[in-house]
Amino acid sequence: MMSKDLVGFGDDLDGSTCRIGIVKTRWNPEIVDSLYEGVRAALNETGVKDENVYDTTVPGSFELPLAARFLALSRQCDVVITIGCLIKGETMHFEYIAEAVTKGLMDIQLQTTIPVIFGVLTVLTEEQAVARSKGENNHGISWGKTAVEMALLRNA
Ligand SMILES: O=c1[nH]c(NC[C@H](O)[C@H](O)[C@H](O)CO)c([N+](=O)[O-])c(=O)[nH]1
């Protein structure tokens, strides 16, 4: 039975062998780029090598699942991190995209066995997004650590 002690967690993660794919959206760039910085800080902290990080962008969150599938099927990544931010507007557009993206990303990791990190903020206001993408509450930090842990678990 696999123990989490075999791959470490939190501060014990060794990402030096992990190959990380990152796909982020061009929508809500200030929020997304701040989340991305949090992800990269966590990858650096766990020893992931810059040459093992593959970066790409898509227009919006609705495009994240297909890009994540491309990366997963490339077999060049041990894990894929998706980064986006959906902010509720006046219509139901938010709900439809959020549901489709969430299910799409889950399906891809189950189909390909490549972990896909759900790094999509789904918030009601821009203030909520800012609060979750800055400083110690930058959710990108935990997404980066989760990515390394899941990559190690997959390859254990
Ligand atoms: O990533 C986002 N895409 C958004 N829309 C674009 C969508 O993800 C697709 O790129 C577009 O529908 C084309 O497929 C957003 N809103 O519409 O509000 C949003 O808040 N965030």
Image (cartoon, rainbow, N blue to C red):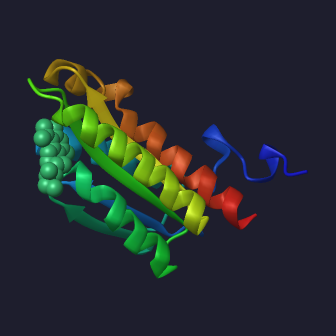
Q: Nearer the viewer, residue 27 or 13?
A: 27
* Rendered view: 51 above or below 140: below
Residue at the right extreme, as displayed? 1
Q: Nearer the viewer, residue 61 or 4?
A: 61
Q: Nearer the viewer, residue 100 or 47?
A: 100
Q: Position of residue 156 (x, y in %)?
A: 76, 63
Q: Is residue 22 in sight in this rendering?
A: yes
Picture residue at 52% right of the left edge, 45% below the top: 145
Image quadrant in which you'd find residue 29: top left
Q: Position of residue 85 (x, y in %)?
A: 24, 39
Picture residue at 31% right of the left edge, 48% below the top: 83
Relative to 14, 131 lies left or right: left
* Rendered view: 17 above or below 144: below
Q: Position of residue 45 (x, y in %)?
A: 49, 49
Image quadrant in which you'd find residue 38: top left
Relative to 111, 94 lies left or right: left
Q: Nearer the viewer, residue 136 or 153?
A: 153
- Image label count: 0
Q: Position of residue 77 (x, y in %)?
A: 49, 72
Picture residue at 42% right of the left edge, 39% below the top: 141
Q: Is residue 42 in sight in this rendering?
A: no
* Rendered view: 100 above or below 142: below
Picture residue at 26% right of the left edge, 21% below the top: 131
Image quadrant in which you'd find residue 102: top left
Relative to 126, 61 lies left or right: right
